[in-house]
Image: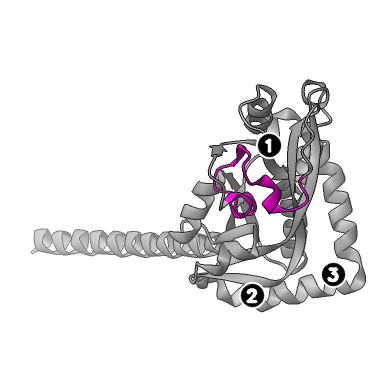
Amino acid sequence: MRLLINQISHAIQLCAICVKNLVLVTFISLFSLGASSSESETIVFGSNEKLVEQYVAQYVIENIYDSIGLKLQVVPLPPSRAKKANLKRRIDGEIARITPYGNDKPSLIRIEPSYYYLETAAYCLKDSTFEITKAEDLKGLSVASIRGVAHSDAATANLKKVYKLDSAMQLFQFLKFKRADVVIDTEINGRRLLQKDQYRSFIKRCGVFKRFELFNYINENRAEIRHKVSNEIRALQASGKLNELIKEAEKKALLLGPEHF
């Protein structure tokens, strides 16, 4: 009898330990779920890597999201990879793309209004006589541009001889060695490169011919932030603070070191 009582007592103790462990495991699981939920609140956007206007856009958009209490993480990617990641919903959207970019992508939401812009510019060798004031002036020329960038894709859409490269530095090297007549980049990105001795003595800007507004694009699964972000952009525009942010961001971006490009 005493042996039976001891066995029952031991069984009760084991049961109590099991219950205690179960409660502990449940608590840890719930805590982990809570942590995951908190982490999922961070919005992850892609940006086109190694471009000055994207660094400007990142600085501005981070300030916009921070001012309305939204956590934001920006991941620099090659432009074509950023597009693919966005369409496959591996990221929540992209920080800065032009209007035509979203026209054939119904799963993406363009947040109005725009909060920054880019200007499409043409660059040529210093002894060149080319004057590019419109996209039609590129007809008959060999042109190089960055792969996956919508504004330069638009400029070169109807041209026969187009080279696609991976970075602005590759473009300028390509031009320097006379592999193309003209290269297409943004005005501000080209301006940064022309600050360098290795390019300034060989290359010039031969025209700025198009302006595009830049918009924040989000996936449908983040639609709930649309109006909040839109309202903040409008408020910053009305107060003049958006222009102040842009000027500050451009100054910082033009001073970035070579490791960013």
Residue 145 vs 35, above or below: the answer is above
Asked if labels 2 and 3 touch by Cβ distance under 8 angstroms, the answer is no
Residue 177: quadrant of the picture: top right
Q: Mark 2 is on which residue type?
A: Arg
Q: Residues within 10 Å of mark 1 (few under 14, many from 20)?
A: many
Q: Mark 1 is on which residue type?
A: Val
Residue lying farthest left? Answer: 1
- How far across and down, in percent of the image, does residue 37 sit? 51, 65
Q: What element carries label 2?
A: helix
- How far across and down, in percent of the image, does residue 57 sit? 73, 54
What's drawn in magenta, residue-wise?
Answer: 132-156
Residue situated in front as seen by the camera: 50 or 159 = 159
Q: Mark 3 is on which residue type?
A: Leu
Residue drawn at x 76%, y 64% is 115
Residue 255: quadrant of the picture: top right
Residue situated in front as seen by the camera: 139 or 39 = 139
Residue drawn at x 62%, y 53% is 73
Residue drawn at x 54%, y 40% is 161
Disc 2 designates what residue? 226
Residue situated in front as seen by the camera: 40 or 26 = 40
How far is mark 1 from mark 2, CA to CA?
39 Å
Disc 1 designates what residue? 182
Disc 3 designates what residue? 236
Q: How crowded is mark 2: few (under 14 residues within 10 Å), some or many (20 or more)?
A: some
Q: Residues within 10 Å of mark 3 (few under 14, many from 20)?
A: some
